[in-house]
Image (cartoon, rainbow, N blue to C red):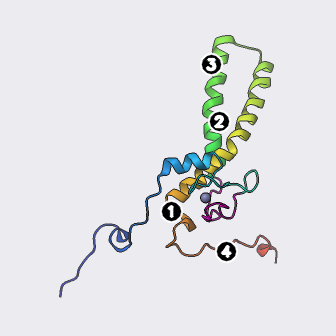
């Protein structure tokens, strides 16, 4: 009796190719707050709330699971800008501590708020471009949202 073994990723042979979604243009559209699919419709329905579906092309955008990735990347980016700038200013001019406080705290807050939307948009677009979560038409239905009051009953 012969047993056949398949090698490689199972989906590599079995599933038909999905159309390629270029990652970089999609992320740039998302960072600009536009739909990653058409670049016309708005990605956001509020400051950080994503729209259910694009009003121009109809692409469903509610499937994203950005979760805490945007704040993580936002902190990483802001930290890599503010900390070197702070160190350069300290080494070159050695300003008083109150000047550091007056300069870097508002600048950190400002940069964080300015980058929130572009970073979230880029990450939602990345998930779209990589067919992650519900953006994959072959994926199972999205899991239902957990009921926050379930533990209190
Ligand atoms: Zn669209």
Residue 55 is covered by the magenta coloring: yes
Residue that numbered label 4 is attached to: 144
Question: Where is 15 relative to 51, above or below?
Answer: below
Question: Which of the 4 image quadrants contains residue 66?
Answer: bottom right
CA–CA distance in space, label 1 to label 2: 28 Å
Query: Given contact means CB atoms under 8 Å apart, are the residues at marks 2 and 3 in contact?
Result: no
Q: Earlier in the sequence, mark 1 or mark 4?
A: 1
Please tell me whether mark 1 or mark 2 is closer to you in this view. Answer: 1
* Of the image marks 2 and 4, the number of the one nearer the N terminus: 2
Query: Which residue is label 3 attached to?
Result: 88
Residue located 67% across and 23% down the image: 86
Q: How far separated are the C-alphas under marks 2 and 4?
A: 34 Å
Decide which of tag 3 and tag 4 comes sooner along the chain.
Answer: 3
In the displayed structure, would residue 22 be above or below residue 112?
below
Question: How far is the residue under mark 2 from the one under mark 3?
Answer: 16 Å
Q: Position of residue 116 (x, y in %)?
A: 69, 45
Mark found first going from the N terminus, 2 or 3: 2
| Residue farthest along the left direction in this orientation | 1
Q: Which residue is mark 1?
A: 131
Q: Which numbered marker is on residue 78?
A: 2
Q: Residues within 10 Å of mark 2 (few under 14, many from 20)?
A: some
Looking at this view, is 108 or 13 the one in front? 13
- Whichever of labels 1 and 3 marks the residue nearer the N terminus, that label is 3
Q: Is residue 136 magenta?
A: no
Q: Secondary structure at mark 4?
A: loop
Secondary structure found at label 1 = loop
């Amino acid at each position: 009796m012969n047993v056949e073994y398949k090698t490689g990723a199972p989906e590599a042979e079995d599933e038909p190719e999905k159309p390629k979604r270029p990652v970089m243009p999609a992320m740039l559209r998302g960072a600009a707050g536009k739909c990653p699919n058409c670049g016309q419709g708005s990605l956001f329905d509020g400051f950080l709330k994503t729209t259910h579906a694009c009003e121009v092309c109809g692409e469903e955008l509610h499937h994203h699971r950005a979760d805490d990735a945007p704040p993580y990347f936002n902190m990483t980016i802001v930290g890599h800008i503010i900390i070197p700038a702070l160190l350069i200013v300290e080494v070159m001019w050695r300003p008083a501590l109150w000047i550091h406080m007056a300069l870097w705290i508002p600048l950190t807050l400002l940069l964080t708020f300015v980058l929130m939307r572009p970073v979230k948009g880029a990450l939602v677009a990345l998930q779209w471009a990589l067919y992650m979560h519900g953006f994959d038409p072959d994926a199972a239905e999205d899991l239902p949202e957990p009921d926050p009051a379930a533990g209190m009953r």
